[in-house]
Image: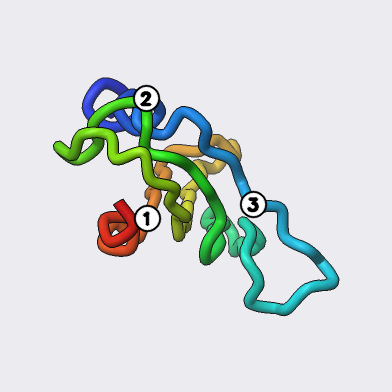
Amino acid sequence: FRESHGALFLQAFPDRSGIARDPTGPEDGPGHYTRIGDGLFAVTGGWPSIHATHTGGQWLGLPPTGRKVEMRVADWYRLDRDDKIIDNWVMIDVPHMLQQM
């Protein structure tokens, strides 16, 4: 995972940063603000929640475009009985990113 996806993503978007949500802003404003948990499961995300520029390398086979993108992201977690993360599913709205790139 680290070599085939994680490292390439980090290289492709070296200036990525999260969007701080304005707590006094609209309910559907940008930011990584969704936080829900139930038992051994949790999710956090935002629509959008990350800004970045595609400058550092290829991603999904596409050479750097130099374009700024916003990412719609949701992270789902499953914990074991000792509260250690055993699964982490990261959903990124890839078609939305490709349209921007």
Residue at the image point whose x is 33% and y is 57% from the top: 100
> Toward the viewer: 44 or 10?
10
Q: Position of residue 96 (x, y in %)?
A: 33, 63
Helix, strand or loop at label 2? It is helix
**What's the coloring here?**
rainbow
Q: Which residue matches tag 2?
A: 11
**In the drawing, does residue 36 fall left or right of residue 58?**
right
Q: Position of residue 17 (x, y in %)?
A: 58, 40
Residue at the image point whose x is 36% and y is 26% from the top: 56
Q: Position of residue 55 (x, y in %)?
A: 37, 31
Point out the tag, 3 or 1, that comes first from the N-terminus. 3
* Label pair 3/1, CB-CB below 8 angstroms: no
For badge 1, the amino acid type reads Met
* Label pair 2/3, CB-CB below 8 angstroms: no
Residue at the image point whose x is 26% and y is 62% from the top: 95
Q: Which residue matches tag 1?
A: 91
Query: Dot 1, crowdedness within 10 Å: few (<14), some or many (≥20)?
Result: few
For badge 2, the amino acid type reads Gln
For badge 3, the amino acid type reads Ile
**In the drawing, does residue 101 fall left or right of residue 20?**
left
Residue at the image point whose x is 66% and y is 61% from the top: 33
Point out the tag, 1 or 2, that comes first from the N-terminus. 2
* Label pair 1/2, CB-CB below 8 angstroms: no
Q: Quadrant of the N terminus?
A: top left
Q: Nearer the viewer, mark 1 or mark 2?
A: 2
Helix, strand or loop at label 3? It is loop
- 57 versus 88 height, above or below: above
Query: Dot 2, crowdedness within 10 Å: few (<14), some or many (≥20)?
Result: some
Q: Which residue matches tag 3?
A: 19
